[in-house]
Each structure stands twice: as structure tokens, then as C-alpha cells.
Image (cartoon, rainbow, N blue to C red):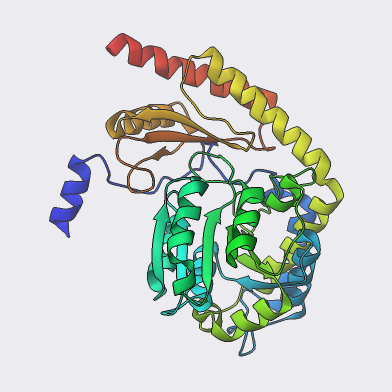
């Protein structure tokens, strides 16, 4: 273990946790600021006193309360789908649902930039698997034309918003492909829920699509909704099936009821204020784009709150991140295996938590660190 850790240090891939106290966090996934919303906190506190700290058991033993049921119903209504089921986290959802949906007689096709939890879910299934180039739907169709008829079920898996670049899958094209080749479409909307669409409903609203029975929507409760956990939405048959077959649901303690209660309030607020949230979030993103442009930094922006500053070198990304920490600015350096080698970046995100003063502070500190780096060069 020591040798492996030393190797990671030499390759600039060693990781350690950072305490964020006293730092201004510019890389959180709390895009809408709901984590500390007073209505959310008040409701979570009320149910914490009523129900206690944890749920006490898995959903199928005694850990399924009215708060779990109400949250599932609220999410299904928000996503405009028939039914919904909760999971302990996005990782648990993906590694539980994907192997439950497809097995030895089936085939999976997965975008090469899908999240690590999707990759692990695909590996845990016993299905034949193919990885297609990022958003290369011609290659996807070619793989289907050669292989689809050999298998019982087919599952196409993609992030809706890709977590490290912030770009968006073409769901309209994927709908057409799934209908043409009789496939299920599994959408990971971890970074799309609360962020895409006029009111934040996600990818289907963004593309003007209605839910269909072959579509499975996974979302997390830990990002724009500000809590913890995850959900899968789809047909009532799908939810019934997952409750009986998804091992990470069956054999995991359920979410604490007070977390569910806080999230019910988060969904309620998002339904009420979603359109305003989205408009304000785009303005924050545009201000960040302006700052990065004025500093001549290379970055990506796809009208989502993920704006990676491209550094490429793992060593340089670590150095800049550490220098920013000294200035009380936290922007995490993202390196292999989260992104390919040589594609290191600083993962800057937009959030409604930022004030105009915060953005001025960020610009000042980025400029200071960049100028110091230029002098050293």
C-alpha cells in the first residue's frame, strides 16, 4: 500500500481531503443554494426531532416512512413521470439499477465520459458491453446495427450533463435511436436536475420531450436539491421491478426521514421558484465566463453551471489549486482517473450562493495566482 501511495504522489495523482472551513467554496454542486435554505432547514429540524437521526432499517424492513413516500411522489410529479423510488446515493443507484436491468442475455452501450458510478454499474452487470466515443451517436448506431438482434434487452446509458465538462447529451437523438432499435435509455441526471430546462426539470424539459416507458431517469438529491441520496424515475413497472431486484436498495439502510423531509421542501421550492432560479443561475454563469475571459484562461462552457478551467498538466493543476487555497479560495484540481491523463482541470462551478462580492474576490485571487505563476515562468 505504501508503495502504491508513493507512486501516486510521484505521478501527481495522490488525493487528500480538504477541510473547507474558512474557505470560499467555488466548486460545490450546491448550484441553487438549497442546502442552507431556511425553509429546508426548518422542515428537516422538525422531522429530526419527530423521527430521530436515522431510519433504522432498509426500505423493505421498516425504514420506509411517509416522508420517503411523499418525497418519491414529489419527485415523480416534478419529473413528470409515473413513479419514483429512492436510493441511498447516486453511486448506489447506478451500481444497483444497471445490473438489475440487464444480465447475461443483454447488451449495454455506454458513453465513454460517463460517471465512474455508471462505469462500475456496467461492469457489475453480466451484460455484453460496448463503450462508444463521447456523444458519437453514429458510432452508437453502428454498434447497434451490428449487435442489437443478438441480445434480449438493450440499455443505452449516458449522463445528461457530463460532470467534468458540463456539456449536454443529445437526448432527442437518443430517443430516436432507442425507438428505432428497441432499447431502454438510462439517463443520469445528477447534474441536470434543477439545472436544465426552463423550470429546472432536467433534460427532457430542456429538449421538449415527454417521458416514455423505455426511459429511466436517475437523479441525485445531493446537488441542486441540496440534500443527500438519489432517485430513479420511470414507469410503475420499472419501480416495482427495482424494489425487488436492485441489491443496493434492498440491502441498504434507507435515507433518514429528516433528510427526506428537507428534500420534500427543496422540491416544493424548486417547483415554486424554478424559472427564477434558472434565470439567476445563467447570470452567475455568464459573470464567471466574463471573468475567465478577461483573465485569458482556457475553459469550457455549455450553459450549465460546470465551467472547467483547463490546465492539462496534473502537476500544474495541483499547484494552482494549492496556491488558491492559501488565498482562501477552494477550487478542486481534477485529475486522472476522473478525467483522462493530460486533461487535468480546475472544476469551477456556478452557484446562487455567490454574491457580487464573492465574484470580485474570485477574480482578484485568480489574477494574483496567475500573475505569480507567470513571473515564475
- Residue furthest to the bottom in view is 61
User: What percent of the width, then of the height, locates residue 99?
Assistant: 47, 75
Residue 317 lies in what quarter of the image? Answer: top left
Pick whichever, 163 or 330, lies toward us: 163
Q: In the picture, residue 168 is in which quadrant?
A: top right
Dividing the image into 4 quarters, which one contains the C terminus? top left
Q: Position of residue 332 (x, y in %)?
A: 44, 38
At a point 30% along the width and 40% down the height, the residue shown is: 341
Residue shown at the point (63%, 38%) measured from the top left? 304
Examine the rendered structure and indicate whether residue 161 appears above or below residue 129. Answer: above
Count every numbered label the image shows and give the total: 0
Is residue 118 visible in the rendered structure shown here?
no
In the picture, the quarter occupied by the N terminus is bottom left
Q: Is residue 24 left or right of residue 63?
A: left
Left or right, 107 with respect to 278, comes to left
Q: Is residue 322 left or right of residue 287?
A: left
Residue at 76%, 49% (x, y): give it. Answer: 205
**Residue placed furthest toward the right:** 272
Looking at the image, the residue that sits furthest to the left is 3
Q: Residue at x 68, y 29 (%)?
A: 284
Vertical relation: 159 (above or below) 155: above
Q: Position of residue 264 (x, y in %)?
A: 77, 63
Evaluate whether residue 82 shows in this view: yes
Figure quadrant of residue 229: bottom right
Amino acid at each position: 500500500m505504501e508503495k502504491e501511495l508513493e507512486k501516486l504522489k510521484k505521478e501527481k495523482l495522490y488525493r487528500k481531503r480538504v477541510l473547507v472551513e474558512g474557505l470560499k467554496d467555488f466548486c460545490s454542486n450546491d448550484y441553487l443554494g438549497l442546502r442552507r435554505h431556511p425553509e429546508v432547514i426548518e422542515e428537516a429540524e422538525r422531522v429530526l426531532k419527530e423521527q430521530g437521526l436515522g431510519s433504522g432499517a432498509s426500505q423493505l424492513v421498516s425504514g420506509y416512512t411517509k416522508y420517503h413516500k411523499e418525497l418519491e411522489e414529489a419527485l415523480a410529479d416534478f419529473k413528470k413521470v409515473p413513479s419514483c423510488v429512492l436510493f441511498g446515493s447516486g453511486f448506489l443507484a447506478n451500481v444497483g439499477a444497471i445490473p438489475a436491468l440487464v444480465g447475461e442475455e443483454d447488451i449495454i452501450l455506454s458513453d465513454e465520459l460517463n460517471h465512474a458510478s455508471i462505469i462500475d454499474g456496467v461492469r457489475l452487470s453480466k451484460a455484453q458491453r460496448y463503450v462508444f466515443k463521447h456523444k458519437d451517436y453514429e458510432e452508437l448506431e453502428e454498434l447497434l446495427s451490428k449487435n442489437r438482434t443478438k441480445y434480449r434487452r438493450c440499455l443505452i446509458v449516458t449522463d445528461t450533463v457530463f460532470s467534468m465538462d458540463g456539456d449536454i447529451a443529445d437526448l432527442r437523438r437518443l430517443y430516436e435511436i432507442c425507438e428505432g432499435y428497441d432499447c431502454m435509455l438510462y439517463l443520469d441526471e445528477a447534474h441536470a436536475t434543477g439545472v436544465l430546462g426552463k423550470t429546472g426539470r432536467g433534460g427532457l424539459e430542456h429538449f421538449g420531450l415527454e417521458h416514455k416507458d423505455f426511459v429511466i431517469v436517475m437523479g441525485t438529491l445531493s446537488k441542486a436539491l441540496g440534500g443527500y441520496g438519489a432517485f430513479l424515475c420511470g414507469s410503475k413497472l420499472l419501480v416495482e421491478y427495482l424494489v425487488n431486484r436492485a441489491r443496493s436498495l434492498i440491502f441498504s439502510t434507507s435515507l433518514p426521514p429528516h433528510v427526506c423531509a428537507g428534500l420534500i421542501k427543496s422540491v416544493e421550492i424548486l417547483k415554486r421558484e424554478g424559472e427564477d432560479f434558472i434565470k439567476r443561475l445563467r447570470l452567475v454563469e455568464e459573470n464567471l465566463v466574463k471573468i475567465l475571459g478577461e483573465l485569458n484562461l482556457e475553459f469550457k462552457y455549455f450553459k450549465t453551471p460546470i465551467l472547467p478551467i483547463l490546465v492539462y498538466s496534473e502537476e500544474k493543476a495541483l499547484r494552482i489549486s494549492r496556491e488558491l487555497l492559501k488565498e482562501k479560495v477552494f477550487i478542486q484540481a481534477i485529475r486522472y482517473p476522473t478525467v483522462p491523463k493530460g486533461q487535468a482541470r480546475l472544476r469551477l462551478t456556478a452557484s446562487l450562493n455567490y454574491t457580487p462580492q464573492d465574484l470580485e474576490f474570485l477574480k482578484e485571487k485568480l489574477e494574483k495566482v496567475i500573475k505569480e505563476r507567470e513571473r515564475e515562468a
